[in-house]
Image: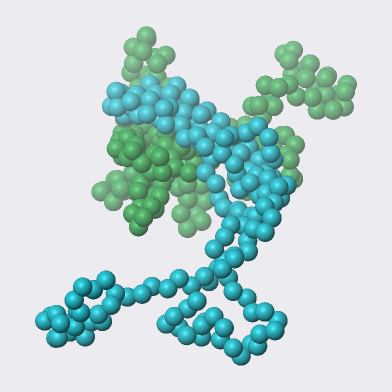
Amino acid sequence: MMPPLMASLRSSISGIRMMSQTSVALAHHSRLKPEKITCMKSDESPVFYRDHVVDKLVRVILKDGKKEIARNAVYDALEIIKRRQYKQWAKAKEDEKSTIELNPFVVANTAIRNCRPLMKLQGVTRGAVTYQVPFPIEESEAEFRAMKMMREVCRQKAKHGETHLKDILATELLAASKNEGLTIQAKQELHKTCEANRAFAHYRG
Amino acid sequence: MFFTNPAFKETLKRTNRPLAPKKWYYSEVTPLCSKNQVEVRRQKVPGSSCTQELQALFGCLKKWEFDDLPCSKLHGEYMRCVEASEKAAEKFKQGARQGILGEGSSSLSTAQFNKIMQLYPQPDMGNSQRRMKRLPTQSYADDLFGRKNTKKPN
């Protein structure tokens, strides 16, 4: 295999770790020199399959500091997604097989991306009245809000009888990746209220 | 002005209302004149809202029944506009704080105005002609301007 040999030769010859631009973009942050050197978090071990969205989802689902429970729930949900998708793939016809997404990380990423709201509602008080004004939102905050909406939906479902978080989360993620489900519905409701309050957009700033 | 003495009015016999209208006195607490400086207050950035892009985004959302995915392009445009306006606002704030004079918007910021007044201060500004001061020859004990009388200030 030529490329790894060339890479090792390059590093041994120059003595400096040379990384191409693409590998820098795709590398885990533990392999790059940070601006400020701090200790790594306990769950950020440099593993090849580390996914930012899945890690953030674990942190959002976290309750009472019980990280193990949250992490196991999310990983089990991903496993359930994989199993269900594989069953579908096995049953599907030849031309439909390529459309089914088997990688659960990709499914989770698309789900969270589809759930991201475009704007948020923030209260602005003018003359003893608090108006709900639509504000623009940053990517990281939009991601968090998507995950929070999903978490609330899962908790509602648990209240209504469904028991295990892994099953609830798996169904929600699969539905959201297809642009269906209660989380997508909640996001669309938010957009509807934003559109209804578009007249107050002038109160921004 | 009274043509007949209001004391003859029947209605006034039963009330304790005063006959003459109430007199209002002006008391010059702070000097009634301009100053060579303006207080620095928070200023709004001219033209910083992205209403056009936002309305276009809402139109697209309504058209697609709030389905997000076809409207990603318009959302991208809106976010770019927001970032640009934020940068412009930062730049304006920096300039307004420093008060750099020169080509800018038609309206002056407070710092710019203060700088101009520093360069060309108006003489004898901030002194009220009407405000009465005790001369060195006059005693402190004398109530020269009736300030101790609360009902009739100067």
User: Which residue is situated farthest in the top direction here?
Assistant: A95
Q: Residue A72, image x and y in percent?
A: 48, 44
Q: Residue at x 29, y 27 (%)?
A: B62
Direction bottom: furthest residue? B141
In the image, is B143 to the left or to the right of A179?
A: right
Is B109 placed left or right of B11 in the picture?
right
| Foreground pick, B92 / A153 | B92
Q: Is residue A39 left or right of residue A202?
A: right
- Give whichever of B3, A17 is nearer the camera: B3
Task: Tell me if A10 is positioned left or right of A77 in this view.
Answer: right
- Looking at this view, is B56 or A69 the one in front? B56
- Answer above or below: position of A54 versus B43: above
Which shade is chain B?
A: cyan
The reply to whether residue B34 is visible in this rendering is: yes
Task: Using the rendered view, name the quadrant where residue A170 is placed.
Answer: top left
Does the rendering let one see residue A51?
A: no
Query: Of residues B142 and A177, which is closer to you in this image?
Result: B142
- Give chain A's shade: green
Q: Image quadrant for the N terminus of chain B?
A: bottom left
Tell me residue A32's x, y (percent).
72, 34
Q: Residue at x 80, y 28 (%)?
A: A17
